[in-house]
Image (cartoon, helix red, strand yellow):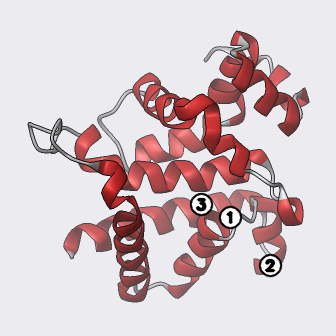
Amino acid sequence: MRNASSNIWKKISDAEYIAGLKKGDNHITESFFYGLCNYMFNEIKYSLMANVDYDELVNELFVYLSKDNWHKLDTFAGINGCSLCSWVTRIAWRYFLKQRDYILGRAMDDIDNVKIEETTDNLDAEITMDVNSTFERMANKRYVQVLQWMLVDGYNADEVADRLGVTVANVYNIKHRAIVQFVEVYNAH
């Protein structure tokens, strides 16, 4: 891994990440995607996109986030102690759930005629309904709660560990199993 081994990425503040990404700073960009977001990308890769290369996932999210001069970053507010890492994790999971079929090569061949701008609100509503429906069908409600807290509400692993009275490592294990169950239930629909 690039900067992940040096841990320099841990010393960069959320504001520095945002400013650096917007101005095209290569060090910040690499630290963001290969350090700060490393765990998230690996979790998405192994839970949702098993046959997709890490760098391809990075490229997909880079294109999505950098659209309109990184406008998506302007929506990060850091409210209630939410970190940039927690926020981007929610954004990334939603994005990759929406784009899963396309990225895995199961999308329609001719996507040039699709008008995404006109369907964004409907698509977001459909995704919300699909996620809620999948949550309702999941057998393990603890898994649902952990996914809700971490991916929807933006809590980090430490906060969830405190709420559950377990270790942070256990939270990551629960989250991984919850994602696997979510994908299985979602695909069975």
Which quadrant is the N terminus positioned in?
top right
Using the image, tell me which numbered label, if any, was put on residue 163. 2
Residue found at x 43% / y 32%: 60
Q: Please state the horizontal and vertical placement of residue 56, each as a whole percent of the image.
A: 40, 26
Using the image, tell me which numbered label, if any, was put on residue 108. none
Using the image, tell me which numbered label, if any, was put on residue 171. 1
Q: Please state the horizontal and vertical placement of residue 16, each as a whole percent of the image.
A: 86, 29
Tell me the kind of residue under disc 1: Val
Residue found at x 87% / y 28%: 12
Q: Mark 3–mark 1 contact, CB under 8 Å?
A: yes
Q: Determine crowd level at label 1: few under 14, some 14-19, many 20+ residues with C-alpha closer than 10 A.
A: many
Instruction: Calculate the distance from the C-alpha at mark 3 to the C-alpha at mark 2.
Output: 15 Å
Q: Please state the horizontal and vertical placement of residue 189, each as a whole percent of the image.
A: 21, 76
Q: Earlier in the sequence, mark 2 or mark 1?
A: 2
Tell me the kind of residue under disc 2: Arg
Residue behind mark 3: 173
Q: Considering the numbered disc 1 on the image, is that residue within a helix, a strand or a loop?
A: helix
